Image: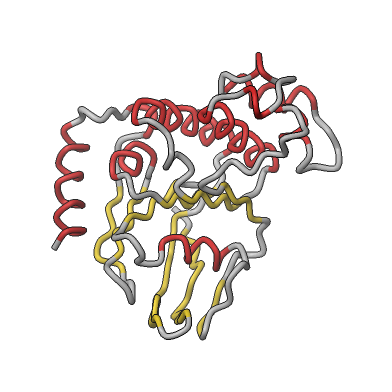
Amino acid sequence: MNQLELLKSISLTYEETCVFDDFSLEVPESKVTCIVGPSGCGKTSILNLLAGLVKVTQGQVNKVDRDVGYIFQEDRLLPWETVYNNVRIVKDQETSKEIMSILKALEIDDFAHSYPKHLSGGMRQRCAIARAFYYHAPLLLMDEPFKSLDYDLRLNLCAYLVKLWEKNRNTIIFVTHDIDEALLLGHRIIVLSKRPAQIEAVFNLATAPSKRTVMDEEHANLRGKIIDLMTK
């Protein structure tokens, strides 16, 4: 399994708050890495660094010469465009068959010509996910994209995301406060400490995401370990 060293010995300070001090991050290529940790520990800052939205105080950010896709906590759809056009807009050349295939995988193909105001929150977020996968970024950043949704809908979207990853096999870094999401999605789970954040633990999951449920014994055992680390 190839490893990507994305952050190397970085430091980051906002005003007088030290978020990272000599922090490094390595993730497996073409896998899903989930990052969990206490609120305010710098999870979103990692994504913003990789997207080039924030500059390090010192150290190296290495995107491995890759395009980067970013799915935010809010869907950021264009309200005057249909679902189909919100997906199409990220590429100069339209591929109708591919767009409809992605929408079908996310079960929103029947709403391709609907506008965001006519969709539920879960449908809008699925549209945002479809747009990111249609862009085909080798590195996809996801910042708590299911945060505002009900628990059962979050679990359903985890399943949809797994389907799309199996088709695209891109490198995904998924930040979440929800341990169940991390355990359902991640090939690797990284647990961060309070700031200045360091890596408390790394868990590599053997079971394929498509075969996991929240009732699995492995799921329950790891959930307990992660909770212990985050509350110590």
State the residue at coordinates (51%, 49%): 142
Figure check: 111 above or below 48: above
Q: As drawn, which residue projects farthest toward the front?
A: 117
The image shows residue 106, relative to residue 2, as above or below, that is above
User: Is 215 placed left or right of 127 in the picture?
Assistant: left
Name above or below for residue 16 compared with residue 40: below
How far across and down, in percent of the image, does residue 85 sit?
77, 31
Q: How many marks?
A: 0
- 86 above or below 109? below
- For the rendered model, the colour scheme is secondary structure
Tell me: 58 left or right of 154: right
User: What residue lies at 46% left-to-right and 32% top-to-bottom?
Assistant: 162
Q: Residue furthest right?
A: 93
The part of the image, by quadrant, that contains residue 223 is top left
Quarter holding the C terminus is bottom left
Question: Where residue 27 sits in the image (x, y, percent)?
Answer: 44, 59
Taking depth in this image into account, of 148 and 192 the one nearest to the observer is 148
**What residue appears at the point 44 percent right and 53 percent down from the top-left corner?**
1
Residue visible at 28% across and 69% down? 194
**Residue at the extreme top:** 110
Place of residue 55 in the rendered image (x, y in percent of width and height, measured from the top left): 58, 76
Between residues 155 and 32, which one lies in front from this camera angle? 155
139 relative position to 182: left or right: right
Q: Position of residue 118 (x, y in %)?
A: 64, 22
